[in-house]
Each structure stands twice: as structure tokens, then as C-alpha cells.
Image (tube, rainbow, N blue to C red):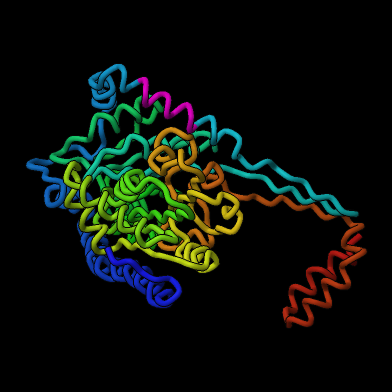
Amino acid sequence: MKIWDLEREYDRLIPFISEGRERRKASIGPAVQKIKKELLAHGEAALVEFSKRWDGWEKEYPLKVTEDEIREAAEAIPHGDRAIIRGMIQNVRAFHRFQKSKSRTYRSRGLLVKEEFVPVEKAMVYVPGGTAPYPSSVTMGVVPAQLAGVKEIFLATPAKKGAINPYILAACSMLGVTEVFRIGGAQAVFAFSFGIGPIPKVDIIVGPGNAYVEEAKRDVYGRVGIDMLAGPSELVVLATEAFSPRLLAWDLMSQAEHDEMAMVGLISPSEAHLREVEQEIDSLIGSSPRAAVTRKALDENGFLARYKDIDKAISLVNAIAPEHMELIGDEALGERILYPGILYVGPSTPVALGDYYIGTNHVLPTSGAGRFTGGLSVDTFLRRKMVVKAEKEFITRYGDNAERLARIEGLFAHGEAIKARKESK
């Protein structure tokens, strides 16, 4: 990876990162639109064809997984692993339990306004499964939906050769999710947005995915709700002091191994430190079964940056708004880091720990979306409902002003509606 000098090359590094993001979108946009077109034209048959083409199906399988399959998969995994998954679920549930927004009431003379929160009825949780199984993503998507009170929760995940990883199904079993569909990729997003064959149209689609899933979610927003654009993984580490090159190497590799399009970066005041981390990566990467994916992500989307002025480093972090952020060293700087999807502070808080067992949600905004939205939460599945009641006292007091504003805006019927209320007995 190239070492960038922030003082001299800041204005080139930002485009390198943003152009990489846009390049990934541009390369897949037409392919995603083709998937959508085929799906709308051929329906369920297209879903099966996509699964044969990309998931290696040698025959046609039912799109919906049976409850027997879910139960048998849960029983097949080791007892110790079931206990670990159950512990993860407990931690995630414990953290998310306090997130639900409370109803609020505003009172003024002659006016009552209630702000209530109502859960959506149908949600689809997308769980990646193309290159690795993610029982953790089952938990992260389902638990906040359940706590929000969503009535119907559906889950979609790719099924290689027709089979879903048993750990994913075990997590579904423990969470009581029975509406599971063996379908992945952009086609899953489109299927649950339009309602295709046995697949229902839902109100919201949540969950992380590759760039194809992200692009499909971007396309369907407005037809259904989405949590955020949660595409290929991102990690930026700011180490303001020398820290174990080996541990930093593992942290960077832990996110790079997700996807060839993952973006990772390390910012340090020492070029020697950056070189040591790079050497550790070269030494360790061969031991990873996902070495090829990791190496491509590092080579194409990774960066190392040296700074002299900490303000420049903070500016870079806020401009990137990375999905994950680690701060090691001067922890007081955390107050100035404004837009990460999540900020992990200190030498004992690696991203990987948060992905599994801290309890915070690992479905987080990517591609700079952290500048305007946060991670998946209970509130994601709730919509704000406003209930307003005005008494005669209020319209007597403010009716003339409201009517005049209607006249200013040239909306005649608005003004007459207000005037009629004022004059009614």
C-alpha cells in the first residue's frame, strides 16, 4: 500500500477514496438494472435461474425454507457453539432494549400534540452468505425488529448449492424466525420490494450486503424503506502513538477479508510505524484462508497515511465518515471524530469484538453515509406518528395569522378552511 503524506497529498487522497467508492458503484449499476429487468419480466422463474447461475443450484429448490430444515440445522451444530450464539443474542438484546423511542406530548393553550412511534408491519432482514456465513448478521437485524414490535419478520440469504449454512439457520431457530428464504443478492432486494411469487412485499429492507445489494437498496428506496446504504466494509484506524503493528495488521485484515471491495486505512504520525504494519500484513496474510480477497481489497482500496498536524488527520477522518473507526492513543480526540458509523476507542476494543459480542449493532452506514445517518437500531423499524388536536381557543387565537399566511401563499382554499372554522359556532 502507498504511504500518503497528509500535509502534501491530502487533496489527492480524498479523491482516491471517493473515486474508489464511485468506481465500484459505476461498475455494478448496469448489472443490477439487468437483474431487476429480468426479475420483473419473468418473476419466480428468474429467481430460480439466478440461483442456478450464481449460487450453484443443480436443481430447483423451494424458495422458502421449511421449519424442519431450520430445526434440524440448529440441532446439527455443536452444543458449545449454540451456547455462544445464544450469548451473542443476549448481549445484542440487552443493548438494544433501551433504544426504543418514547412517546412525547406537547401542550399549549388550546393545543395538544402527541408524537407516537408505531412499528412497521413487515420487515426483511438480509443476511450475506455468498463468501462467508453470518449468524451475527441474523442477530443484528432480527433483534431490534423484534424489540420494535414488527409483526412479520422475513429473512433472506444466499444458499450455495441450495443449502443455507446451518449456523445461520441455528440463529434463526434461537430467535424464533421461521420465514426464511434461500435467495440472495440484488434479486432478493428486488423480490421483497415488489413481491415475487411466494415472496411478499415488505415495508422495509435492512441488513448489510455486497455492492450489488447496496445498489439494489438504493434503487428501491421509496418503494420500500431501507435502513441505510450498508455496502462493502470500511475501517479507518487513527493511531496517535506507536501501537503493536501486529495487532493493527490483524484489525485491518479483519475488515479487508469481508469483500474485495472493502476499504481500510491506517493513519499514524510515524512512517516507520506504517511500514512495520505493512510488513506484518505481508507476514500474516498467507495464513488466512481468505488471503486472495484480503490482498485485493488492500491493494485496490487500502491506504496508509502519515500526518504531522493532528488537525489534518481529524479532517481526513471526518471527510471519509468511515463505517468503522478505531482510535488508539489520545482518546480525547474522540469528541472531534464526528461521523463514523461506530467509534471503537482504546487498545482493547477491536472492530471484530464489536462485530460479535459487545452488543452494539454491526449494520452500519458506509460510503460516507455516516455524515447523515446512523447504524441499525430499534428506531429503524419505527415510524413517527403525529396526533394533533386543536381546541376552539387555539383557532381563535391564531386563526387570523394562519389565514393571512394562506393568502400570502396564494392558496385560497387553505384560507377559507381556516376562516370557516373561526366563524363556525
Which residue is rendered at x = 18% and y = 35% of the image? 163
Name above or below for residue 92 compared with residue 25.
above
Camera-nearest residue between 288 and 54: 288
Give the residue at x 59% y 43%.
118
Q: Is residue 94 above or below residue 48?
A: above
Work out which residue is located at the far left of the displayed protein and give it: 58
Q: Is residue 113 left or right of residue 132?
A: right
At 48% across and 33% down in the image, what residue appears?
A: 92
- Left or right: where 155 falls relative to 378: left
Whether residue 319 can be seen here: no
- Taking the magenta stretch, the answer to whether it contains residue 73 is no
Residues in magenta, as a range: 83-92
Q: Is residue 414 visible?
A: yes
Work out which residue is located at the far front of the displayed protein and give it: 272
x then y, percent, for residue 226: 44, 54
Q: Quadrant of residue 148?
A: top right
Residue 50 drawn at (x, y percent)? 17, 52
Q: Nearer the viewer, residue 307 or 417?
A: 307
Image coordinates of residue 130 in percent, x first then y, are 22, 46
Where the C terminus falls, by quadrant? bottom right
Residue nearer the viewer, 145 or 291: 291
Magenta highlight: main SS? helix
Q: Is residue 84 magenta?
A: yes
On screen, residue 2 above or below 257: below
Q: Which one is nearer the viewer's eye here, 197 or 33?
A: 33
Find residue 161 and report its horizontal and vertical position in percent. Answer: 13, 40
Image height of 370 relative to 132, above or below: below
Q: Residue at x 35, y 54 (%)?
A: 194
Q: Where the N terminus falls, by quadrant? A: bottom left
Left or right: where does residue 297 sit relative to residue 49? right
Task: State the count of labels.
Answer: 0
